[in-house]
Amino acid sequence: MNPDHYLHLAAVLFTIGASGVLLRRNAIVVFMCVELMLNAANLAFVTVARTRSEVDGQVFAFFTMVVAAAEVVVGLAIIMAIFRSRRSVSVDDDSLLKF
């Protein structure tokens, strides 16, 4: 396959993730859309690294995966704490993080 196909796929995945972040109201869905955007960036990093025969993009993708793993741990803990106190994870509530 042509590397352009991978870059187009990364752009489509990033667009789907960005629209999910902007349009959805459930925090879990927004969280998954952010992960989709990070995976799209990883795909673009690796594709560009493969076309240039360099390792830089793969290193960036590795660090992005590390950041995504940390985001999962912290983000899910925050979402679970909000759900336990409010019984809702809607992002429309203005005072979710005020205790």
Image (spheres, rainbow, N blue to C red):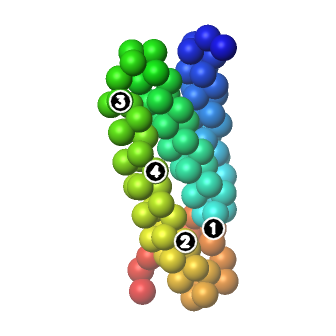
Against 25, is 19 above or below? above
The amino acid type, in three-letter code, at marker 4 is Met
Q: Nearer the viewer, residue 90 or 20?
A: 20
Q: Which residue is at a point 63% across and 72% down the rendered structure image?
A: 89
Classed neighbour count for the residue bearing mark 2: other residues with Cα under 10 Å, few (<14), some (14–19), many (≥20): some
Q: Residue 98 occupies which quadrant of the picture? A: bottom left
Image quadrant containing the N terminus? top right
Alpha carbon of mark 3 to alpha carbon of mark 4: how far?
Answer: 16 Å
Alpha carbon of mark 2 to alpha carbon of mark 4: how far?
Answer: 16 Å
- The disc placed on residue 10 is none
Measured as percent of width and height from the top left, residue 50 is found at: 46, 21
Identify the mark nearer the N-term, 1 or 3.
3
**Comparing labels 3 and 4, the label whose residue is closer to the camera:** 3
The amino acid type, in three-letter code, at marker 2 is Leu
Q: Are marks 3 and 2 in contact (CB under 8 Å)?
A: no
**Comparing labels 1 and 3, the label whose residue is closer to the camera:** 3
SS type, badge 1? loop
Classed neighbour count for the residue bearing mark 3: other residues with Cα under 10 Å, few (<14), some (14–19), many (≥20): few
46 horizontally vs 89: left or right? left
67 horizontally vs 37: left or right? left
The residue at which mark 3 appears reads as 55
The residue at which mark 1 appears reads as 90
SS type, badge 3? loop
- The disc placed on residue 65 is 4
Q: Which residue is at a point 43% across and 40% down the rendered structure image?
A: 61
**Comparing labels 3 and 2, the label whose residue is closer to the camera:** 3
- The disc placed on residue 76 is 2
Q: Which residue is at a point 64% across and 45% down the rendered structure image?
A: 20
Q: How many marks?
A: 4
Q: Can residue 69 be seen in the rendering of this structure? A: yes
Classed neighbour count for the residue bearing mark 1: other residues with Cα under 10 Å, few (<14), some (14–19), many (≥20): some
